Image: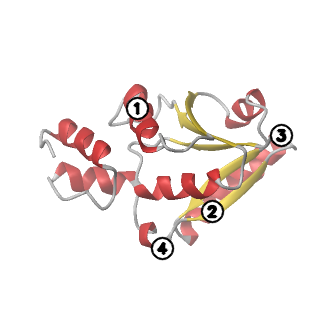
């Protein structure tokens, strides 16, 4: 059984993330969406809220699981018996950073391979940060996130959608 890990903060999950999950779920037996618990990064949503939103977004995928992790990604990958990391790329600027991470992970754990997936062109501009900014000004985010995530953002910013 081939297990892959798609790590990220997912604060919140967007249609761009879901696009990567959809495509990655088709090339692996099991895909774990691994939500990073990073105390140094200020998140809008709690870990529990992020997991809830992701689980709602992936509920129809039979081979996708959602978990949280902390520490080194390579340690989590080993713990899960996985050897593939999935990363989404929006632009060339993402590649340089992601390449460094992939090479470092490979140096730390020789059995890890990273698969880079290009984000669907319609989501190439989209990031969680942009979604939060638009939502904070009561903008229409329905093209960026699921209705459930839009509702949660509305609650955070006091503008129920």
Tell me, what colour scheme is on the image? secondary structure
Residue located beneath label 1 in the image: 52
Quadrant housing the N terminus: top right
The tag earlier along the polypeptide, 4 or 3, is 3
Circles 4 and 3, Cβ within 8 Å, touching? The answer is no
Q: Nearer the viewer, mark 4 or mark 3?
A: 4
Tell me whether the residue at label 1 lies in contact with that at label 3, contact meaning CB atoms closer than 8 angstroms. no
Q: Residues within 10 Å of mark 4 (few under 14, many from 20)?
A: few
Question: With 119 as the anchor, is 138 left or right in this view?
Answer: left
Give the percent coordinates (x, y) of residue 16: 46, 58
Q: In whole angstroms, how far apart are the C-alphas of marks 4 and 3? A: 32 Å
Question: Dividing the picture into quarters, in which one does residue 131 lie?
Answer: bottom left
- For label 4, the residue is 121
* Horizontal side, residue 31 vs residue 78: left or right: left
Disc 4/disc 1 C-alpha distance (Å): 27 Å
Earlier residue among tags 2 and 3:
3
Image location of residue 123, percent across then percent down = 43, 66
The reply to whether discs 2 and 4 touch (Cβ–Cβ < 8 Å) is no
Residue 100, above or below 47: below
- Which label sits on residue 117? 2
Give the class, few, some or many, for how many residues have Cα within 10 Å of label 2's Cα (few <14, many ≥20): some
Secondary structure state at the residue bearing disc 3 = loop
Q: Residues under labels 2 and 3: Cα distance?
A: 21 Å
């Amino acid at each position: 059984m081939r297990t892959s890990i798609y790590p990220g903060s997912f604060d919140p999950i967007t249609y761009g993330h879901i696009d990567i999950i959809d495509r990655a779920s088709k090339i692996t037996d099991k895909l774990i969406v691994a939500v990073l618990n990073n105390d140094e990064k200020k998140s809008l949503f709690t870990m529990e809220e992020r997991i809830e939103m992701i689980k709602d977004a992936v509920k129809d995928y039979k081979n996708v699981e959602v978990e949280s992790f902390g520490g080194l990604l390579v340690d989590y990958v080993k713990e899960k018996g996985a050897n593939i990391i999935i990363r989404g790329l929006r632009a060339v600027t993402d590649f340089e950073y992601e390449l460094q991470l992939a090479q470092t992970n490979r140096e730390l754990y020789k059995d890890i391979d990273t698969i880079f997936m290009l984000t669907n062109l319609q989501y190439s501009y989209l990031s969680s940060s942009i979604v939060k900014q638009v939502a904070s000004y009561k903008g229409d985010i329905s093209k960026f996130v699921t209705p459930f995530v839009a509702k949660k953002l509305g609650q955070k910013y006091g503008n129920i959608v």
